Amino acid sequence: MSQVLTDLEQVLETLREIQIKAEDFKDGTQEDFNLKINQTIDYLRSIDENAEQVQFFIPAYLIRHVDEGGNPGDILKQKLAEIQNNLYKLGARRAAAKRFADILDKPIVDPPSDAPLG
């Protein structure tokens, strides 16, 4: 598993380097560009060879979303918004519980003697 993660990190880093080289492409950079492409291919081969060692789960709703032409990033944004909303609600609940605890911590005082009983 750790080899696959290492290779995935290397793929991402190499793709970033390829993007930089592609943006700054000059006549002398073709060899560097080819080297980075070949490194990416080697990392992808390694990932493919080690893929059986990794178990992962892809939710059915995500597969359906992609099959219907959706972007997986949309699901990520939706889930992040749900998490943020839940954290906001949790924060509000904690604040309410804290206020309630503060009220309970206050000592009970006798009403003034001239207060109407009622």
Image (cartoon, rainbow, N blue to C red):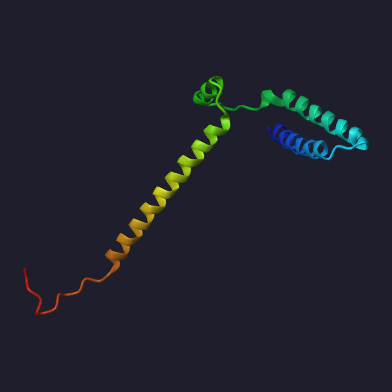
Image coordinates of residue 96 in percent, x first then y, are 33, 56
Q: Is residue 61 above or below residue 26?
A: above
Residue 92 in picture, x, y percent from top left: 38, 53
Question: Which is nearer the eye, 28 or 95?
Answer: 28
Drawn side of residue 23 relative to residue 106, left or right: right
Q: Is residue 32 above or below residue 85?
A: above
| Along the viewing direction, whichever of 84 and 101 lies nearer the viewer | 84
Q: Quadrant of residue 40?
A: top right
Could you tell me which residue is drawn at 84 percent across and 33 percent down? Answer: 36
Q: How many marks?
A: 0
Q: Residue furthest top?
A: 67
In which quadrant of the rendered view does residue 8 lie?
top right
Instruction: Please identify the quadrant where the N terminus is shown.
Output: top right
Q: 56 above or below 118?
A: above
Query: Going by the image, does 45 lie left or right of 95?
Result: right
Q: Position of residue 87 (x, y in %)?
A: 44, 48
Q: Is 110 or 96 nearer to us in this picture?
A: 96
Q: Quadrant of the C terminus?
A: bottom left
- Work out which residue is located at the far right of the displayed protein and give it: 28
Question: Who's the residue at 45% across and 40% down the image?
Answer: 82
What residue lies at 6% left-to-right and 71% top-to-bottom? 117
